[in-house]
Image (spheres, rainbow, N blue to C red):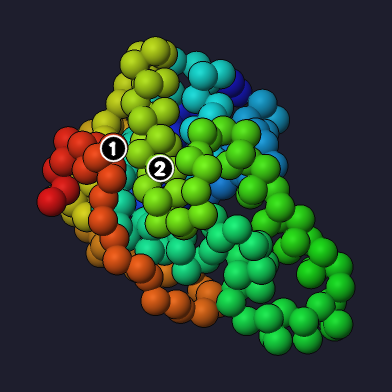
């Protein structure tokens, strides 16, 4: 695919945007959800050599096996809490559409109806994307669905890496600074600057309390293998 040299993947809310900024700041301009987004893949008509996107995972199978893959993982409880606040798997889409503030969204829609329609379509596209690429349990519990997403998404990455033989490195985002030299070597960075840990915030979403996180067996086995307690 048209010159793509490196790709950062993982679950959403795991630090892919942070890593994209890190590469860019150190001389490797990297897109963040520029080539792969909720609407599809645009690698064939881009000059970007590095990209970071959780949406790229379903397209790993079409990439050249020389593309260097950095697999970023984050503790599943943190990923679940972040997506729960967003409302990714809420059975009703309004939390995701309105960012938890229906009054603000409604008033904004009056001023800019086109932006409101675009936001609604963006959220609907997310739901289509996830239904197309995941085998989610038929339950209403959001946290359980988010655990299934976390386990399946990371497992798909591993399966595709094994099948294609990509140059591969997996890093816990919590260990980013302590493993920076490995990341630099993976992407042939020379003399990169130190970097603080990312603030994994989604600006504009109203916070809400997260239910107690109790890992399923599937989640527990994978998080243990990744080195999480």
Which quadrant of the rendered structure holds the N terminus? top right
Badge 1 element: helix
Please identify the residue farthest to the front as the structure is shown: 139
**Label drawn at residue 140:** none
Residue 146 sits above or below residue 158 on the image: below
Whether residue 214 is visible: yes
| Contact check, label 2 and label 1, Cβ < 8 Å | yes
Determine the residue positioned at 52% across, 43% down. 138
Query: Which percent across, then down, holds residue 204?
Result: 55, 77
- Dot 2 or dot 1, earlier in sequence: 2
Q: Report the front residue among 213 and 66.
A: 213
Query: Which percent across, then down, holds residue 77?
Result: 30, 57
Q: Quadrant of residue 165?
A: top left
Badge 2 element: helix
Q: Which residue is mark 2?
A: 148
Disc 2 crowd, CA 10 A, few/some/many (<14, 14-19, 20+): many
Q: Report the front residue among 91 and 179.
A: 91
Query: Which percent across, then down, holds residue 67?
Result: 43, 23
Determine the residue positioned at 58% across, 77% down. 100
Determine the residue positioned at 38% across, 64% down. 81
Residue 202 sits above or below residue 144 on the image: below
Q: Is residue 219 left or right of residue 56?
A: left
Query: Which percent across, then down, holds residue 201?
Result: 42, 69
Q: Which residue is mark 1?
A: 218
Whether residue 48 is visible: no
């Amino acid at each position: 695919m048209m010159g793509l040299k490196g790709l950062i993947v993982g679950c959403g809310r795991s630090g892919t945007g942070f890593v994209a900024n890190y590469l860019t700041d150190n001389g490797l301009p990297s897109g963040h959800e520029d080539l792969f987004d909720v609407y599809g893949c645009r690698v064939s008509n881009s000059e970007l050599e590095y990209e970071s996107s959780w949406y790229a995972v379903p397209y790993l199978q079409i990439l050249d096996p020389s593309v260097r893959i950095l697999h970023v993982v984050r503790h599943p409880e943190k990923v679940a809490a972040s997506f729960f606040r967003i409302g990714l798997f809420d059975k009703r889409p309004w939390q995701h559409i309105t960012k938890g503030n229906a009054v603000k969204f409604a008033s904004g829609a009056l001023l800019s109806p086109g932006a409101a329609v675009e936001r609604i379509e963006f959220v609907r596209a997310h739901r289509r994307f996830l239904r197309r690429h995941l085998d989610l349990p038929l339950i209403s519990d959001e946290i359980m669905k988010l655990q299934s997403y976390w386990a399946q998404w990371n497992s798909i990455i591993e399966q595709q890496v094994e099948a294609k033989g990509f140059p591969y490195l997996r890093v816990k985002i919590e260990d980013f600074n302590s493993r920076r030299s490995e990341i630099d070597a993976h992407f042939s960075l020379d003399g990169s600057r130190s970097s603080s840990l990312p603030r994994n915030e989604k600006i504009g979403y109203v916070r809400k309390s997260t239910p107690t996180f109790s890992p399923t067996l599937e989640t527990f086995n994978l998080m243990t293998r990744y080195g999480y307690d």
